[in-house]
Amino acid sequence: MNDLAKLHALAIEAAQAPSQLILSGFRNPALVTEHKSDGSPVTRFDKEAERTIRAYLAERQTEKWPVLGEEFGADPVDAKYRWVVDPIDGTQAFVRGLPTFGTLLAFEEVATQRALVGVIHLPAAGETYSAARGLGAWCNGERIHIAPPREMKDCMISIPAASLIRLASGEATRTRLNRITPRWRCFSDCAAHAMVARGSLDAHAEFGLCRWDIAATEVIVAEAGGVVLIRDSAQEPGKYDSLFGEAQAVRQIAGLFDFNPAS
């Protein structure tokens, strides 16, 4: 793919475009929450933010690549590449006033589902994490790197509660995790993904993700020097499980829980 630098710049601008709109709904007592058919929350800000991103891309990209979005699905266009957008990743956090939500935008090759450009924009923190293949990973214009190799006892591992249950059953999981590291936490949403990319967390595991939840993270963590494992979810057809972070930590966690990526 030619000119990833231009696509990278465009992706950053598009992901930031609905930032003020989103923040106008954050901790707003008038915020109204609805629920989708799967029970997940959605607000008018999710929908308006995706419309804003789609319009921004349509007006400014030189080639009219289609979009796959959480709120409005996939454009009915057969193309080699596409944009993948989650306008508010972590809507539950957003409606509860927690600052861990963000906007995710990726540009990927459709056939391989390999992200070439990715952006995680965290409006409440005022931080934008981004990367393009071969161009490194960045936060607000500064180069970022994953954590250095550490002994597992010194690592901080993040596994959201729902994913923790799927890895193994209750006490057994906690016992196995505590055996290798006492510093595991239940962080969630795209803020946790960004913290892996900048080295604040050593690794993160999450289950039952949609493509828009992981595409941007895939390239950002890889370009920050990390390893990203993705497999098809056995529990939720059409979704994905992921494990990513510093290579040594990822290998040990993968071995502990038999996390094997798709071949």
Image: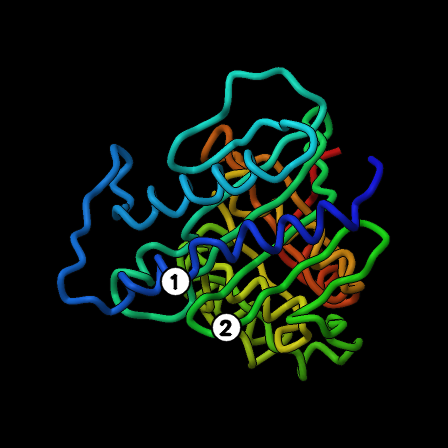
Q: Secondary structure at mark 1?
A: helix
Kindly report the distance in space between the C-alpha atoms of the residues bearing marks 1 and 2. Answer: 11 Å
Compared to residue 30, the image places residue 84 above or below, namely above
Residue at the image position 24 percent from the left and 69 percent from the top: 27
Q: Which residue occupies the foreground of this view, 64 or 196?
A: 64
Q: Give the residue type at disc 1.
A: Gln
Q: Position of residue 60 (x, y in %)?
A: 61, 40
Q: Depth-wise, is mark 1 or mark 2 nearer the camera?
A: 1
Compared with 109, 120 (above or below) is below
Badge 1 crowding class, 10 Å Cα cut-off, few under 14, some 14 to 19, many 20 or more, is few
- Quadrant containing the N terminus in the rendered view: top right
Q: Position of residue 149 (x, y in %)?
A: 80, 76
Residue 11 point in image, percent of width and height: 63, 49
Indicate the quadrant where residue 157 lies.
Answer: bottom right
Residue type highlighted by circle 2: Gly
Q: Which residue is mark 2?
A: 126
Frontmost residue, 122 versus 193 = 122
Mark drawn on residue 20: 1
Q: Is residue 31 above or below residue 259?
A: below
Q: Is disc 2 placed on a helix, strand or loop? A: loop
In the picture, measured across the screen, residue 91 lies left or right of residue 253, that is: left
- Which mark is drawn over residue 47? none
